[in-house]
Amino acid sequence: MPQRAPWRLESLLDSSASLCLALALVILSLTGVGNVKTASLAGLILCGAGLTRETARTDLWVLVPLMVYDLAALASSWAAFGNIVDGYGAMHGLFPVLYLLASCLDGREQRLLRSCCLLWAGAAAAAGIGRFAFQVIVQGWAVRMSGLLGNPNAMGIFLVMSWFLLMHCDEEDRGPGLLRLEPLLLIALALTLSMGSFAAMAAGIAVLLLEKKQSASWRETVRFICPVLARAVLGMGTGLLVYLAAARTGVPWLCLLPLAYGGAAAAGWGAFGRWLNARPRMAFLIASMGLLVAAAAVAVRPSAAATFSERLEMMASGLRYLPADPLRGVGPLRWRLLDLNDGGKYFNTWHIHNIPLHVGVEMGWIAMAAIVLAGLRGLRRKQSAPLRAGTAAFLFHNLMDTSFFYLGITALALTAGSQPESGGRTLGGRAVKAVFALFGLLFLYSLYFSFR
């Protein structure tokens, strides 16, 4: 045993970039939409790790649009405020840095990064469930779970993407410990009652279905997807029972019973998965109950329809401002002020709940085109079916919500939730170091400016 310790320490040191990315994901998840100081410090750490790398294999059709988007955001900030730090450009410089650094990882480092991200997602889910139970039992009331991200919708899509990431990992990589995270993620997801996240999850599952159908018959496709749906039904159904027991029975502590059942299910989750694979008819039957779970979710939160209607009105408001300044946009953080003073309905939010539209309004059409190109390329590029499904869920969610502006969520999409090296182009050490040095200077200046 003593002889193995130096090897393990050396292995961790060799994986410093993976650990930096995992640490950044944790920090950015806790900061929500972020602030310049935290983003700049995280960016400097990531650039420092990147400067130690010699090569990267990356998809330039994602990396270059991310850089163009950030340049357009910086230009918009300069036009609106006379500096490049106020607004989004300084913080969103993290996105190309995260993507490029993830491109530098080899297979072992990528597996380590994904394992760390899944452990963090599991910890966030457990913390959210624990806080929900505390509020119910001690304070006597139940609300939608917002978790460590501070918002139910943001927490919801974060858990959806983590679920697809877990699905990507094979049994050898994730092991029995990580396997038990699946019911935890699903129960926590249900407690968010985020209809947008549920719809994004459905979009991701549809991508899984289509991917499988390209290489299999309908019978084989149905046999593949039914166990996936059955596990989702059991996990999310348990979460909905927890919420209903807490909010609708008049005896809030009864939520402990379905929570205990969820714990028991987690303990035997591997056996349950094998049972579903061995009994396809039962898997189909349980998967069919997903319609009941969906109906229950809609019944628990009937206000979702009104919320969706309001978001359509918000998008209509954004469309009116889209032609205002196609080159630079109206300026970061300016749409809310325009919405407040235009005499129409005031939506009391900083972001239009459609990311391409919001980017086009506030940062101009170049930024909008760049972010759309990066998103479409991320969906079409070669990667595993579960990761493509997670990308689809993330993109779908951003057509009706604002998860792009939550730095931890986009960080997950660009690193562990993607395969930036797949089908990419190899960049030499000089190019890689130049990019990291350039963004390092941006973060250094932003940090200095924020302390003035």
Image (cartoon, grey):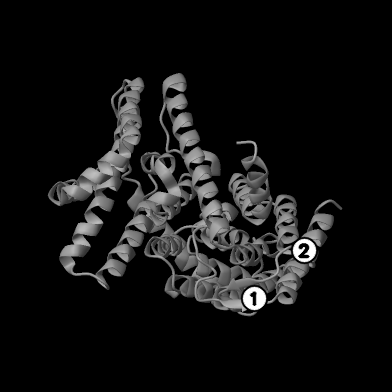
Which residue has dot 2 on it? 440
Identify the image quadrant of the N terminus.
top right
Residue neighbourhood size for the residue with mark 1, other residues' Cα within 10 Å, grouped as few (<14), some (14–19), many (≥20): some
Q: How many marks?
A: 2
Q: Is 377 on the left-hand or right-hand side of 86?
A: left
Q: Nearer the viewer's eye, disc 1 or disc 2? A: 2
Q: Is residue 334 above or below residue 64?
A: above
Which residue has dot 1 on it? 68
Q: Is 316 on the left-hand or right-hand side of 285?
A: right
Quadrant in which residue 50 is drawn: bottom right
Residue 375 drawn at (x, y percent) = 49, 71
Label 2 residue SS: helix
Seen from the viewer's position, the closer of residues 390 and 349 is 390
Residue 233 can be seen in this image: no
Residue 173 can be seen in this image: yes
Q: Residue at point 22% right, 64% down?
A: 221
Tell me which amino acid carries mark 1: Val
Residue 215 drawn at (x, y percent) = 26, 72
Seen from the viewer's position, the closer of residues 254 and 305 is 254
Q: Residue at point 76% right, 73% down?
A: 434
Q: Is residue 244 above or below residue 5?
A: above
Earlier residue among tags 1 and 2: 1
Quadrant in which residue 141 is drawn: top left
Seen from the viewer's position, the closer of residues 423 and 299 is 423
Q: Is residue 434 above or below residue 94?
A: below
